[in-house]
Image (tube, rainbow, N blue to C red):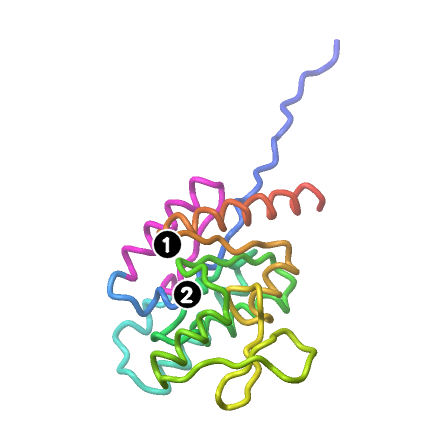
Amino acid sequence: MCEKRDMAVPVVAQPKVYLAGDLVFRPNAYALFEELKAICRQVGVVGMAPFDGQEEVEDMEPGIATSLAIATLDRKLMDFCDAGIFCLDPFRRGPDMDPGTAVELGYMSAQGKPLAGFTVDGRTYPQKVQAYRKDAWGDELFPRVSKGGSGSLEDADGLIVHSEGMVQNIMVEGFIRMSGGIVGIHDSIHEAFRIAITALAQNLTQRIKQA
């Protein structure tokens, strides 16, 4: 008679996803991150907000020491996470996303981690530049005389308006897509996030199966 043995089932930890974006500067930041974390749980991942683990800086006065402490803690959290999801919304009424978020995206891309993006602004990057130039400077975009590159227009300063067909800078959206990710677009930031995090969770699950 064979001895019956209990076979232990290995427990696989849920992937941890860094939640990045200018959301940290918004008035309802803490509540918004809790709502996004709830959506993460629904798709089987753990959302990690930049605020997580930053209790030590809450009572520090604004200044370079505090800023460097935050940057250090954010980098440590990115190292800890398995993937990143980034808000690509235009920042401070300009056409471009928050520059700090773009740095974080590049950092996690260099680590070879899966990425995703989300935004409530589905206009292409050239459309955003065109609207910004008109509102801020009262000028228009012009067709380029020369060819090549990623844009067919230039602004009044002669700079190429690049990244046609993308919602943000070609390197930003390009890195997301090269990692196997997508950009979720919806009028609701929660739904845009849900679209992106669902695809990212599937990407992570596939990687786990292949490992």
Residue 187 placement (x, y as % from top left): 37, 53
Number of numbered discs on residues = 2
Q: Amino acid at mark 2?
A: Asp
Of 52 and 140, which appears nearest the observer?
140
Precedes in sequence: disc 1 or disc 2: 2
Q: In the orientation shown, which residue stands out farthest toward the bottom?
A: 157
- Horizontal side of residue 156 vs 208, given as left or right: left
Rendered image: mark on residue 89: 2
> Quarter of the image holding residue 205?
top right
Under circle 1, the secondary element is: helix
Instruction: Answer whether residue 60 is magenta in the image.
Output: no
- Horizontal side of residue 53 vs 151, given as left or right: left
- Horizontal side of residue 41 vs 182, given as left or right: left
| Above or below: residue 12 compared with residue 184 | above
Q: Which residues are magenta?
A: 29-53
C-alpha separation, residue under disc 1 versus residue under disc 2: 10 Å
Residue 54 placement (x, y as % from top left): 36, 68
Q: Amino acid at mark 1?
A: Ile
Q: Are marks 1 and 2 in contact (CB under 8 Å)?
A: yes
Residue with the mark numbered 1: 189
Of 73 and 17, which appears nearest the observer?
17
